[in-house]
Image (cartoon, rainbow, N blue to C red):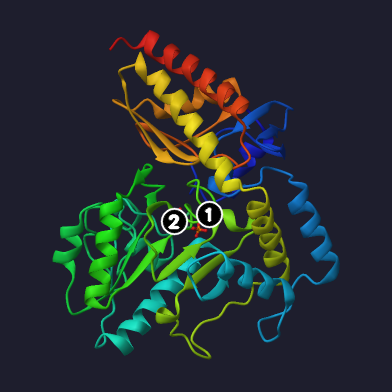
């Protein structure tokens, strides 16, 4: 696929993203269009960001109205959308306080700062945060150190202290217990690992972590940057497990496409005081006005409930494909964060063929495809995607005998 934009990217942009060869120019609902006018069903959803779909009037209205009023001030002053959003999040969660950042990695950095201050004052100077294998917490130096993917770290030493050199296996409570020392101040996990390949935590694991953190005066941090705001079929991922952390971070779905992140914490973990943390853009009127509109719509339309229903339907359909295709080894996830796993590395080839068929998809591993579409996805759209996926898989298997 030749395009002057693809050519320009290859010359001008840092080569950090392995991009799908398509230039997107427009979107509506769960569909996007490329520069040639070809339509695609979008199962990537901006990496689980576009919860309300593309060009949602809710977002367009909030954005344009706020832009005409007040785009940015600074946190030296009070602004209304920031405080309305803070109140709405607290009213609808297990937390007491919130701070807004611009992204997921910043929210996690702030959460780790909070945990370190907690350790400093409440646990004899403890500072280490236990994280897990296959986790993803972002790309700053500290968060790539926390992340359980060695390839992200190898050229960036010296890495900051305060994390395990080898993150512990996920869903292994004993490993967390063994890794806990006098230096430990917190445990940070994702309720469902997204980038790691759609790996759900077990209920016993998260409850075990909750109990362990309570017994040892550690903060439990849930990185809900990907799982928060309806993605798993509940408003927050922790609700699916009925295990509340002390600190929760959000970002991706919160703004529906406008950059915003958040740290939420309980009164117990609410240890920041004046000067401890800050951000120039974090929580500005434009971003928070849009996130407020997204949150109100999410609650009003019960998007978590919708995501649960359509997500179950999607898993049902994928399990239907699996019934007579034994090379499909797993279908997993919750709500509209779903993975389909194969017994060999066919994900990249499937992505290419799906693109031709007019479906955008993501592969977090060589043998896994991930669905993280807008939460407004319909069952008809599921039928369309699964039908095309079946065709693509059958084509791949027709030419590569098992
Ligand atoms: C995407 C993601 C991050 C990083 O968020 P950015 O906004 O890209 O910095 C952190 N944690 C999890 C679980 C994520 O999925």
Name the spot of residue 152 as percent of width and height, x first. 35, 54
Residue 124 is labelled as: none
Residue 229 screen position, x and y as percent = 55, 54
Taking the image as shown, residue 122 lies to the left or right of residue 260, namely: left
Which residue position is annotated with label 2? 239
Residue 4 in picture, x, y percent from top left: 68, 35
Q: Residues within 10 Å of mark 1 (few under 14, many from 20)?
A: many
Q: Residue 88, image x and y in percent?
A: 63, 67
> Would you say residue 256 is visible in this rendering?
no
Whether residue 75 sits left or right of residue 184 in the image: it is: right
Nearer-the-camera pick, 226 or 235: 235
Q: Is residue 228 above or below residue 217?
A: above
Q: Residue at x 43, y 17 (%)?
A: 393
User: Within the image, what quadrant is residue 66 found in?
Assistant: bottom right
Q: Which residue is more in the foreground, 165 or 196?
A: 196
Question: Which label number is shown at residue 235?
Answer: 1
Q: Secondary structure at mark 1?
A: loop
Eyeballing the image, is 77 above or below 48?
Answer: below
Distance between the alpha carbons at the discs numbered 1 and 2: 7 Å
Q: Quadrant of the N terminus?
A: top right
Secondary structure, mark 2, is helix
Answer yes or no: is residue 5 visible. yes
- Residue name at image x 40 percent, y 59 percent: 137
Crowd class of label 2 (few under 14; some 14 to 19; many from 20; radius 10 Å): some
User: Vertical placement of 21 versus 264: above or below?
Assistant: above
Check contact, mark 1 vs mark 2: CB within 8 A: yes
Seen at 41% across and 36% down, the residue is: 339
Looking at the figure, which quarter contains the C terminus? top left
């Amino acid at each position: 696929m030749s395009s002057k934009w693809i050519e320009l990217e290859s010359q001008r942009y840092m080569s950090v993203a392995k991009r799908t060869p398509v230039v997107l120019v427009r979107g509506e609902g769960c569909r996007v269009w490329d520069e040639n006018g070809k339509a695609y069903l979008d199962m990537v959803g901006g990496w689980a960001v576009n919860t309300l779909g593309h060009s949602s009037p809710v977002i367009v209205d909030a954005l344009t109205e706020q832009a005409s009023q007040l785009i940015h001030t600074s946190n030296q002053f009070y602004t209304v959308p920031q405080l309305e959003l803070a109140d709405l999040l607290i009213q609808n969660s297990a937390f007491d306080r919130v701070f807004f950042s611009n992204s997921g990695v910043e929210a996690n950095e702030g959460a780790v700062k909070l945990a370190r201050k907690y350790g400093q004052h409440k646990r004899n100077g403890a500072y280490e945060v236990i994280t897990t294998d296959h986790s993803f917490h972002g790309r700053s130096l500290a968060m790539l150190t926390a992340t359980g993917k060695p390839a992200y770290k190898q050229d960036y030493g010296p890495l900051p202290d305060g994390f395990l050199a080898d993150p512990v296996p996920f869903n292994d409570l004993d490993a967390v217990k063994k890794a806990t020392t006098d230096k430990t101040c917190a445990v940070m996990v994702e309720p469902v690992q997204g980038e790691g390949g759609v790996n759900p935590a077990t209920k016993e694991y998260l409850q075990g972590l909750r109990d362990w953190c309570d017994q040892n005066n550690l903060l439990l941090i849930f990185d809900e940057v990907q799982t928060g705001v309806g993605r798993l079929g509940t408003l927050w991922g922790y609700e699916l497990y009925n295990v509340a952390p002390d600190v929760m971070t959000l970002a991706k779905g919160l703004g529906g496409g406008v950059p915003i992140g958040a740290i939420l914490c309980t009164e117990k973990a609410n240890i920041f005081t004046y000067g401890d943390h800050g951000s120039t853009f974090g929580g500005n009127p434009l971003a928070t006005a849009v996130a407020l509109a997204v949150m109100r719509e999410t609650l009003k339309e019960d998007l978590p409930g919708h995501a649960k229903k359509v997500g179950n339907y999607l898993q049902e359909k994928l399990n239907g494909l699996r019934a007579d295709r034994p090379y499909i080894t797993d279908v997993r996830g919750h709500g509209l964060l779903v993975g389909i796993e194969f017994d060999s590395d066919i994900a990249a080839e499937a992505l290419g063929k799906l693109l031709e068929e007019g479906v955008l998809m993501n592969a977090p591993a060589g043998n896994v495809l991930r669905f993280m579409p807008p939460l407004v996805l319909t069952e008809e759209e599921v039928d369309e995607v699964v039908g095309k996926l079946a065709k693509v898989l059958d084509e791949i298997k027709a030419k590569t005998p098992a």
